[in-house]
Image (cartoon, coloured by chain):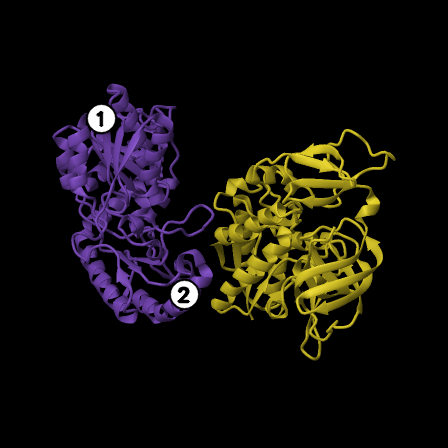
Chain colours: A yellow, B purple
Amino acid sequence: MRVLAALSGGVDSAVAAARAVEAGHDVVGVHMALSRNRDEFRSGSRGCCSIEDSHDARRAADKLGIPYYVWDLSEEFHDTVVKDFLSEYSAGRTPNPCVRCNEHIKFDTLLERAQALGFDAVCTGHYARIEIRDDGVRELHRAADAAKDQSYVLAVMGPDKLARSMFPLGTAETKSDVRAEAAARGLGVSNKPDSYDICFVADGDTKGFLQRALGESPGEIQDESGAVVGEHTGAYSYTVGQRKGLGIGRPAADGAPRYVTGVDTARNVVTVGPETLLSVSTLEADAAVWLAPDVSADAPTRCEAQVRAHGMPVPGTVTRDGDRIVVELDEPMRGVAAGQSLVVFDGTRVLGQATLAKREA
Amino acid sequence: MPPHYLDHAATTPMLDAARAAYVAELARVGNPSALHKSGRLARSVVEDARERMASALGAHPTEVIWTSGGTEADNLALKGLFWARHQADPRRTRIVTSAIEHHAGLDPAHWLESEHGAVTVVLPVDPEGRVDLDALRAEVAAHFDEIALISVMWANNEVGTVQPVREIVNIATEHEIPVHADAVQAVGHIPVDFRASGLATMAVSAHKFGGPVGVGALVARRDLTITPLTHGGGQERRVRSGTLNAAGFHAASVAATEAVATLEAEADRLGVLQRQLIARVRDAVPEARLSGPEPGPERLPGNVHFVFPGCAAEALMFVLDSHGVEASNGSACSAGVAQASHVLIAMGRPERDAASTMRFSLGHTSTQDDLDALIAVLPEAVTRARTVAGVFDASVFG
């Protein structure tokens, strides 16, 4: 197969490309430049967007003996991922930019370009497994290494995109195995630290990034009775379930910690309350992408639901109605914010994904 | 199979004689500034090279200031002349340049503007990339006592347009304004005679005419004061400190001598290939449009530059490269991201054209085979690049 390997400059994508080469594919490496002004993005060895990272990607391609190109996707990245990030926060929702990047950049723009240039598949360093069944159905599964599993952020791609994707690291036992493999292959990135933060928030300060982009907008923090208990600098920068950084001097009457229970950007009000108010038993989500053509879920179907990249899956039943998904949870979940990505699993298998809707207060 | 190399304007293979000279001199020890015998011998290599280089360029040996390449020579000329002329007369704040300069000429001017109070005046060009002489005349007439220097390249690196250097110098001479020319693409390819040109300074790069990378020169008239960029041992008339690169200078001078000696015959040979390539590209891709002047004295003989309407240059390059045909789509930044050409924009082309260019540059190793290989894959590359244009750059092609 002709395979386009996305090389971020990190260890995972380098080893994934190496495995694709070793499997006998005709591999070309591409690094995606996501910012016009590279200095704005996280620098050093943390992310995928700095000049150092493009250098590391180039050196990995050299080592593998594959052609290497840099594609400028900065406009697409800004227009889809960064703008979406800001508009979602300004609407009082909590977006996951990595999901958006997979949806719009890696498995859309990149995949389309690759296909237009005659490639059969795009290979990335994501930790997830694709299983092809005898009947031809492709299943997306959690990675062998549960700690590194990234099936949550990949679930947004539809079956047609899954058919043109390749995740050679899905079977890796652990991340340290991947590092050892990189070292054995002579890839200089074998000791490069993992990245965790959002790549376009250079200093990891999401609140500061939002305030610089959206401006300060002071307003009230109210408790569940409507009483004003504090002030904020912009409701958009709060997330339901958040406990830290509220800056409320006066404790609750019962002394229990308070959490953000609601973000109303239209009124610019943040509501706080006790942990009990955060509990949710029903998850409703829109814009569903369904990855399991053999599971209709028209009727309630057993599943596990996950709403954060590293969140615990909670058992329940899922019902799908077109592009809307409803999950009735066996036990309540807390810290559920509109805008988050809901991924529904059956064991290790991804059934589908959708975006959590605003809860009616 | 070795690739078909059509990127000689980026760098051209070293001439055999220059490579042999380089390797031989690398065996020598001795700092040319040292006073002992080894030092004296090394110095004599440097001075022989200086004389040879001067002779090839129509300059006096004392006018050759060795540098690390064309970019350093351009920086030295622009900053060194601006600082010295501004210091001599504080009214002189203007740097007059053109919109189609190489970044090595444009960026120092803009840097002087942002950091040193210069006023950069960018002259427009005509649709074939020729500097607008009327605009220059008007600028000089209005501001002659405020102009620190004029900087216009001898020949453009992207579209190959040869600039009217003689006329530019004539306009400047009346007011004794120094003119700098970036002659990096010209030397060894079209006749360049520093003395006859009337230029104040001229930048030269060895690896563009078969010498080694990392060697260049600023040719500078003796009557000019140039403020140094680097301070140290005081080499090169105290204008350019740093240990002298005897082997590099030697090889550069050998390359310059050969390139200039064979220039006429080589220009004829390349001119034939150039005309043939232009005709065959037009034949294979009828909607392709040549940028810059038709072949002749106003165009570098090795330069062929086309706009392929509706094609993303990145994709064209990608497909050609995968077929072993190596060409360029304009200037690349350090991270390797292709950008729309500022030269094409200056020539009045819309942004979508400026993102749809390919430059095929010929040199001393180019043969008919290279052209055949390109023409064999070009139609497919264009078809593919056209299908993916929207995918590649929706903001330009969407």
| Left or right for B357, reference B256 | right
| Kind of residue at disc 2 | Ala
> Residue B336: horizontal and vertical position, in percent?
45, 50
| Kind of residue at disc 1 | Glu
What residue did someone put label 2 on? Answer: B385
Q: Residue at x 65, y 47 (%)?
A: A92
Determine if marks 1 and 2 fall on one subunit: yes
Q: Which circle marks residue B245 in the picture?
A: none
Q: Residue at x 23, y 34 (%)?
A: B150
Is disc 1 placed on a helix, strand or loop? helix
Give the CA distance from mark 1 to mark 2. 48 Å
| Left or right for A175, reference B32 | right
Closer to the camera, B26 or B278?
Answer: B278
What residue did someone put label 1 on? Answer: B146
Closer to the camera, B294 or B94?
Answer: B94
In the rendered view, tell whether residue B175 sits above or below residue B6: above
